[in-house]
């Protein structure tokens, strides 16, 4: 995820169906954000530095949109 964002991909473009290679990172990130209060502080810190927090939820995939 970090490399994806550092490569210039906007966190705002992520949605639950986002794929990077064969990994459904959107689903993974959704789980991280929906269990935020149970994440280890270090995990929350890493995600916060990437601007990935519950305050910035992932949009649902648009109907008919294909994940990348």
Image (spheres, rainbow, N blue to C red):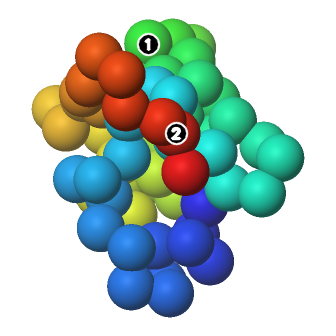
Q: Residue furthest left?
A: 55
- Note whether 35 is above or below 9 in the view shown: above
Q: Is residue 45 left or right of residue 41?
A: left
Task: Kindly identify which residue carries mark 1.
Answer: 34
Position in image of residue 1 (x %, y %)? 60, 60
> Where is residue 12 shown, x and y percent of the image?
22, 53
Q: Residue furthest right?
A: 22
Q: Secondary structure at mark 2?
A: loop
| Quarter of the figure with residue 38 | top right
Q: Residue at x 47, y 51 (%)?
A: 47
Q: Which mark is residue 67?
A: 2
Circle 2/circle 1 CB separation < 8 Å = no
Report whether residue 10 is seen.
yes
Which mark is first along the chain, 1 or 2? 1
Q: Nearer the viewer, mark 2 or mark 1?
A: 2
Neighbor class of circle 1 (other Cα within 10 Å; few <14, some 14-19, many 20+) is few
Instruction: Identify the element where label 1 is drawn.
Output: helix
Q: Residue at x 26, y 24 (%)?
A: 62
Q: Of residues 12 and 37, which is closer to you in this image?
A: 12
Q: Residue at x 30, y 67 (%)?
A: 10
Q: Position of residue 61 (x, y in %)?
A: 34, 25
Q: Dividing the picture into quarters, in which one does residue 34 lie?
A: top left
Q: Position of residue 59 (x, y in %)?
A: 24, 27
């Amino acid at each position: 995820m970090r490399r994806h964002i550092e490569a210039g991909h906007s966190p705002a473009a992520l949605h639950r169906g986002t794929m990077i290679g064969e990994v459904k990172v959107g689903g993974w990130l959704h789980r991280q954000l929906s269990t935020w209060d149970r994440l280890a502080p270090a995990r929350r810190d890493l995600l916060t530095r990437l601007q990935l927090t519950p305050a910035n939820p992932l949009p649902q995939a648009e109907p008919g949109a294909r994940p990348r």
